[in-house]
Image (tube, rainbow, N blue to C red):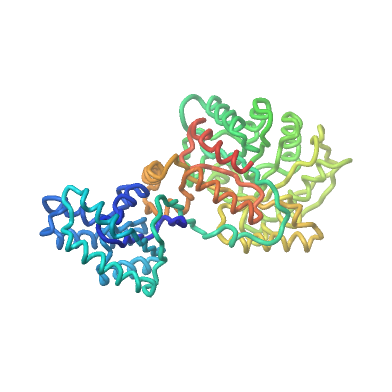
Amino acid sequence: MDPIPDPALVVLVGPSGAGKSTWADQNFRLEEIISSDRLRSIVGSGEHDLDASVDAFAVLDQMVAARLKRRLLTVVDTLGFDNERRLRHLALAREVGLPTILVIFEVPEALARERNRQRTRPVPASVLTSQLRRFRQLRARLGEEGWDLRTAGDEVAIKPARAIGSPAESAAGPGRARRMRMVLHLARFTGAGDLRTRLLSMSEAAEEAGFDGISLMDHLVQIPQVGREWEDFPEVFSSLGFLAGRTTKPTLGALVTNVRLRNPALLAKMLATIDVLSGGRAFCGLGAGWFKAEQVAYGYEFEDPGRRLDRLEDALSILPLMWGPGKANYRGKVESVIDAVCYPRPTGRIPIIVGGRGSRTIKLAGSHADGLNLVGTKNLRQHVDLFRASAVEASRDPDELEVSVLDTPLLGKDRSEVAAMVEANRGRLGASVFAATHNAGTVADHVDRLRMLAGSGVGAVYLSPVGLASPEGVAAWKPVVEALA
């Protein structure tokens, strides 16, 4: 049976003894199943209290409507023979844009009767005969209602629906197939122990898990999207210098460096030093800077977007000159260098990755940088098309450049843990919105999702998992990293 997306409306249709409830219990969480039998036991004396059926179905309809309104996976476990109710549920799901799946339970009549006989309270034989007849009549016309029809199998995969659809449909253009790089992006430094211990333990866990790199944010205080301003938040290049001496394999860099905080010549010197001390593992994330409050607090003028992008453009020109032969001379729109030298030289080329979504930022990445980093995959095709076109316009080979995304996923060991983690972290967001935004899922879900991204041309993912606060949280991603390797 094909995977069922989460969220969706799933309606089960079949006579008594067809195995609907057993199948539902095996494949879905209890909270996702709305069963008429269970509701009879709540509003009446038990599952077989037929006198409670009217009240039970009234509650069922209310629960279905409420869950669909919140875009939650909803499994309706009844006989499914009530045409009016079935079509009403179909219309409700369509109103909120959810997939509508009807699962048909076709079993031999003899098997249905045998299962019924084994029940504590069997359905009367004449009633079952009537159900089997009605099911045969209904089965012939179900295809006309517009459902995604499925035939029940023993087991079904539940696949989280993505906020942006299939990555393969969203990403851009031809390109050279590459192994996807996985970089752990550390954005928060809470948890047990002091700051040094936390940073070191997380980095060691990332290296042991096989991550290709470690990145940190370049901010002066914690940003409001991630945490609280009074949290420990280390200066990025001091931290990278520390990690250069305590790790051996992962690449190290900032995602992304704010060009307003350091002049490009000084930044080149800092990166070259980290590259040498780490044995050639430095990379340079670069951006125009956006967080006004921290810049004003630290005495920087927060410039208009055009001026900030002029600085970015100058930095993209100055950095390679500083790392190249001879002395660097450059007069830009904002930044200039005169006879500047940078020793020690980097051990090799330090990749420059520009982060941002604005059209001018993306064009600068295509014409000057080694890669473009995007936060999430919204409008991915549009952004990458512009990136590649800008590279071609600058007489560069776009296939030699890398597109990466910053991903903020949520990982649980099974669907129940995923649901619990969504509930614990969603704040005021609806559960389905939060789950889709953060691609909440299991290891298998994330492997499938990231493989699609890799197949569509994304060369690297910077993972900043929701709620990451311990080395164990990093280690949980090891199966994903290994699968993509």
- Residue 61 placement (x, y as % from top left): 24, 62
Q: Say which residue appears at 70% left-offset and 41% top-offset.
A: 283
Toward the viewer: 115 or 359?
Answer: 115
For residue 82, side relative to residue 312 (left or right): left
Residue 282, image quadrant? top right
Toward the viewer: 159 or 461?
Answer: 159
**If the image is split into quadrants, where does the C terminus sit?**
top right
**If the image is split into quadrants, where does the N terminus sit?**
bottom left
- Residue 402 placement (x, y as % from top left): 70, 51
Evaluate whether residue 415 shows in this view: yes
Residue at the farthest right position:
326
- Residue 323 placement (x, y as % from top left): 81, 41
For residue 371, side relative to residue 481 (left or right): right
Evaluate whether residue 288 shows in this view: no
Residue 9, image quadrant? bottom left
Vertical placement of residue 166 versus 325, above or below:
below
- Residue 154 placement (x, y as % from top left): 40, 51
Q: Say which residue appears at 67% left-offset and 58% top-offset.
A: 362
Residue at the farthest front position:
110
Q: Say which residue appears at 25% left-offset and 52% top-offset.
A: 114
Q: Say which residue appears at 21% left-offset and 64% top-offset.
A: 129
